[in-house]
Image: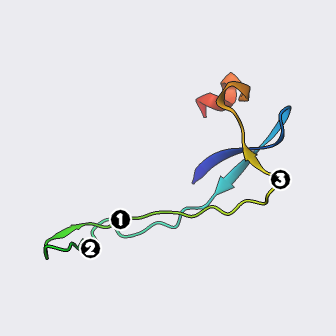
Amino acid sequence: MSRIHLAQNTSTFREKFIDIIPYDMQLKQVLANGKQWALNVGVVLILPKEFELTPFDQISPEMKKR
């Protein structure tokens, strides 16, 4: 599971948990040259307009440790 800190305004933030679906690490993709390589994996996170990523300096030290 991955964590992202989201701010509603400059003085508050919420910790959101995002489930990342596990995949088979043995899967390979075929490159343009025909060789097999590790599978590229990405994620798209869609947030409402009112959300912003919390500035790193506003996150408490105990939250940074997590």
Apparent side of residue 5 relative to residue 43 in the rendered image (left or right): right
Mark 1 nearby-residue class (10 Å; few <14, some 14–19, many ≥20): few
Is disc 2 in contact with disc 1, using a CB cutoff of under 8 Å? yes
- Circle nearer the N terminus (2, 1): 2
Apparent side of residue 58 relative to residue 27 in the rendered image (left or right): right
Instruction: Name the residue type under label 2.
Output: Gln
- Circle nearer the N terminus (2, 3): 2
Q: Which percent across, then down, holds residue 37?
A: 21, 66
Name the residue carrying label 1.
Answer: 40
- Name the residue rendered at 62%, 30% in the picture: 64
**In terms of secondary structure, where does tag 3 sit?**
loop
Circle on res. 50: 3
Q: How is the image coloured?
A: rainbow
> In front of the other: label 2 or label 3?
3
- Name the residue rendered at 52%, 63% in the picture: 43
Instruction: Name the residue type under label 1.
Output: Asn
Asked where in the image residue 26 lies, by quadrant, the reply is bottom left
Vertical comparison of 64 with 51: above or below: above
- Quadrant occupied by the N terminus: bottom right
Name the residue carrying label 2.
Answer: 29
Q: Which percent across, then down, holds residue 56?
A: 65, 30
- Name the residue rendered at 67%, 23% in the picture: 61
